[in-house]
Image (spheres, coloured by chain):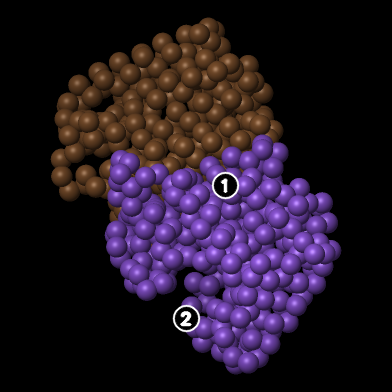
Chain colours: A purple, B brown
């Protein structure tokens, strides 16, 4: 199966599941549910949940069981985008060619929509078998918190005015983008019933991939890594990290094919 | 034991536990940990965790086991205050006589500190025995979400300009304040190993108490209920709800004493 078809199939399944988990627009108080749905269904490619499902599959697990957690990860991603776009943060009016949540619904509702999505994600994580659920929640909340994504956002904000330098840039990349991607892979492995060693491999794969992902983003936006190393140097680094990522999951043999395909696919995004 | 002593003892224990669960100020990136601690340790009375511990005790449970969840509830409460105070929400410069989080650390850090506290609360909930943890997380996230506290905040914002009227005011009270208080009681019962019937009684007690609590707040601030019914009428309603609350927990017999004492204590706040 071509990897683009796997990703597209995942996207459809994830979108359907997200629709079933999110409160309906009509439900009172309607405006918050509209705002949540507006941002969740604004054209995301669902890469993180696709990686989670692929990791679960690589571990020999049932992807249906991984669906609530995959959706939870996407809600966390959406929460982070909504709050990142707010005037006190990046102050962005548009995302993916559409008005940002606060431009469409006002700042207060956007703030609360983000809060509600983060909160709802834990409700979805709690749907797994209790022992699994607790591990998912530990993994996700560690990835989101000040030792993960939020830590990365803090350092990103504090270095907006000045040139961050490579170590700071690396901290931002591994935390702001890398932590949630690595957590997606780890959670997929946990749900799939992988051994501790294999779970660690999946996480490592996710860590390398997450940084490669951010570097490619930087190249497309001509900032960060691309500013320091130039487009070619940055792409070489992204390719190197993708190779390192793929090496980590060799232990899955033929079952690693989809994950390998996704990482190659992400590397091709700029072409 | 006098109820004030129970509450004060709880406060000390909770503060100590919160200190152990929160990242140290020095930990990188320091500013976010400072902001989180600034708001968590800004003079809160820890009523919600005290109610949770009292409910656990009434159910015959070990309060030590309830400590992480009690702290989680307090972190959620703090998160809601930080976001409520933001310029796009209530735009408050002071809380409990101290600068609000965004006045002290800037809007971006305050936003992220709130996010981090909500996120950390789930990490604490996950510390319980898995089956218990999953029930705690379901209960807490329902109480926080758009069918609970956040729903109440949305309706509160939307009715800021106009006179809300009694049904809307009741929706705001039961959701914005009542839901988290009721959840605290329910969670205490779950951890304490109470029967389903007793857990429901505790939740009901919490629902009545939560509304009484908000009405008393309204009297102190001369708004909401106090505007509609006058101070005396509002206090009569708070007293009536406190009686109804206490009736719910009669089933606990002598073990209900502390909970009864807390509800009477809250009613006396205005005197």
Tag 2 subunit = A
Q: Which mark is residue A68?
A: 1
Q: Position of residue B153 (x, y in %)?
A: 33, 44
* Between B149 and A230, the one nearer to me in the picture: A230
Q: Residue at x 37, y 74 (%)?
A: A97
* Between B175 and A209, the one nearer to me in the picture: A209
Q: Which mark is residue A161?
A: 2
* Left or right of residue B203: residue A52: right
Q: Position of residue A72 (x, y in %)?
A: 55, 51
Q: Position of residue A5 (x, y in %)?
A: 59, 67
Helix, strand or loop for disc 1: helix
* Left or right of residue A32: residue B253: right
Q: Residue at x 56, y 55 (%)?
A: A73
Give the quadrant of the C terminus of chain A.
bottom right
**Count of numbered badges drawn on the protein:** 2
Helix, strand or loop for disc 2: loop
């Amino acid at each position: 199966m071509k990897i683009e078809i796997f990703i597209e199939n995942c996207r459809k399944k994830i979108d359907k599941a997200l629709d079933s988990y999110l409160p309906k627009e009509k439900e009172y108080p309607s405006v918050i549910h509209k705002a949540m749905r507006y941002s969740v269904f604004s054209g995301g490619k669902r890469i993180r949940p696709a990686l989670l499902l692929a990791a679960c599959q690589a571990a020999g697990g049932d992807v249906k069981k991984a669906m609530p957690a995959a959706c939870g990860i996407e809600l966390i991603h959406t929460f982070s985008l909504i709050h990142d776009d707010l005037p006190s943060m990046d102050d962005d009016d548009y995302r993916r060619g559409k008005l940002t949540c606060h431009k469409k619904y006002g700042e207060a509702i956007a703030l609360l929509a983000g809060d509600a999505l983060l909160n709802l994600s834990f409700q979805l994580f709690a749907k797994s078998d209790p022992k699994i659920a607790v591990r998912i929640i530990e993994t996700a909340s560690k990835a989101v918190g000040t030792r993960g994504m939020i830590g990365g956002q803090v350092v990103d904000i504090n270095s907006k005015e000045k040139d961050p330098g490579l170590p700071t840039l690396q901290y931002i990349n591994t935390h702001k983008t890398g932590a949630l991607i690595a957590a997606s892979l780890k959670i997929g492995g946990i749900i799939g019933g992988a051994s501790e060693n294999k779970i660690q491999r999946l996480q490592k794969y996710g860590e390398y991939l997450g940084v490669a992902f951010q570097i490619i983003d930087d190249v497309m936006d001509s900032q960060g890594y691309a500013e320091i190393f130039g487009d070619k140097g940055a792409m070489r680094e992204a390719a190197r990290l993708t190779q390192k990522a793929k090496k980590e999951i060799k232990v899955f043999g033929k079952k690693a094919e989809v994950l390998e395909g996704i990482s190659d696919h992400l590397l091709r995004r700029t072409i």
